[in-house]
Image (cartoon, helix red, strand yellow):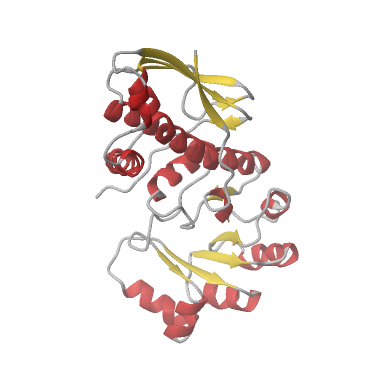
């Protein structure tokens, strides 16, 4: 299966995921039928607007469109913004017209996708802007909402970040437990190189001594776990461009710029997908 995620397009794998995620969300919410919507006459039509209540980077329009396509075929959506656009408080995102029952049944699921993916995109944009004039790049992790990994990684791209491996199957990240179980840094790197897979191999180190060992063992992608700023600078100097260095652990908006200025090429931030604040959205009938 193609798991690549284009910057602003939709890969075949992601299109399949959108259908799966939306169908699952609709089934979870609607079940055997929307009882509350039955209060509305079946032929009654309505117009509504989705409004954002705080500054955000909008992401998730394909998911919202799929919600309405599957559950509200009578509804027409006129989007007033584009995917990845920065919006302001109380800005209208789209206008929707159609049967009132269908519109009301679809409301929550469409907003859930928009608020969650816009949250990841908004968070990512803040981090990316903070280091925009440095050599470093903001990277995501596997710390995603279960069942939403491709969606959240897409949102990271929309926000201006970059994706790491999708899962355990398309990249090797050697952490401290792998090193301990394999018998050491050299041993685990040799074992990784012996695997017949055309994937990236990254190893995590926790000290300058481990970094020196990893470089000597031929590591080309090294994760510097919870290094201080001084140790990050020392790591860059020690490395002399031999491997790509990535900082990880304790990254915040307050310190990411200082970390980027140490000279590392990559900075992974788990909070892009893990500690997100859902964007405040509402749908209002005209």
Q: Which residue: 34% across, 33% down?
A: 35
Q: Residue furthest front?
A: 39
Q: Quadrant of residue 277?
A: top right
Depth check, front residue: 284 or 16 = 284
**For the image shown, how many numbered marks are present on the structure?**
0
Depth check, front residue: 139 or 86 = 86
Q: Which residue: 54% across, 23% down?
A: 51
x and y percentages locating residue 197 in the rendered image: 29, 65
x and y percentages locating residue 53 in the rendered image: 61, 28
Q: Which residue: 48% across, 36% down?
A: 158
Q: Is residue 1 left or right of residue 95?
A: left
x and y percentages locating residue 91 in the rendered image: 59, 20
Q: Is residue 171 left or right of residue 116?
A: left
Q: Is residue 160 visible?
A: no
Q: Is residue 262 visible?
A: yes
Q: Is residue 228 left or right of residue 63?
A: right
Q: Residue furthest left?
A: 1
Q: Which residue: 29% across, 13% down?
A: 43
x and y percentages locating residue 257 in the rendered image: 70, 48
Say above or below: 59 vs 276: above
Q: Residue furthest bottom?
A: 183
Q: Quadrant of residue 263?
A: bottom right
Say above or below: 283 vs 171: above
Say above or below: 221 vs 68: below
Depth check, front residue: 258 or 134 = 258
Depth check, front residue: 36 or 140 = 36
């Amino acid at each position: 299966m193609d798991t690549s995620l284009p910057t602003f397009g939709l890969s075949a794998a992601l299109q399949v995921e959108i259908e799966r995620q939306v169908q699952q969300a609709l089934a979870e919410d609607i079940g055997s039928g929307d009882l509350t919507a039955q209060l509305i006459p079946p032929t009654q039509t309505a117009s509504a607007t989705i409004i954002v209540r705080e500054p955000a980077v909008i992401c998730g329009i394909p998911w919202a469109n799929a919600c309405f396509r599957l559950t509200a075929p009578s509804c027409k959506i006129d989007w007033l913004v584009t995917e990845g656009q920065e919006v302001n408080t109380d800005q209208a995102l789209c206008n929707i017209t159609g049967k009132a029952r269908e519109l009301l049944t679809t409301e929550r699921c469409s907003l859930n996708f928009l608020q969650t993916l816009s949250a990841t995109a908004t968070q990512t944009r803040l981090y990316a802007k903070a280091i925009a004039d440095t050599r470093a790049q903001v990277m995501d992790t596997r710390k995603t909402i279960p069942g939403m990994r491709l969606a959240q990684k897409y949102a990271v791209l929309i926000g201006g970040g970059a994706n790491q491996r999708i899962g355990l199957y398309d990249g090797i990240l050697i952490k401290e437990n792998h090193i301990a179980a394999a018998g050491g840094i050299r041993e685990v790197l040799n074992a990784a190189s012996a695997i017949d897979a055309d994937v990236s191999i990254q190893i995590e180190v926790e000290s300058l001594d481990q970094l020196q060992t990893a470089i000597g063992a031929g590591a080309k992608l090294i994760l510097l776990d919870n290094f201080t700023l001084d140790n990050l600078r020392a790591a860059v100097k020690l490395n002399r461009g031999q491997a790509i260095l990535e900082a990880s652990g304790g990254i915040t908006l307050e310190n990411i710029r200082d970390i980027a200025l140490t000279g590392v090429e990559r900075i992974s931030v788990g909070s892009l997908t893990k500690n997100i604040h859902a964007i405040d959205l509402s749908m209002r009938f005209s």
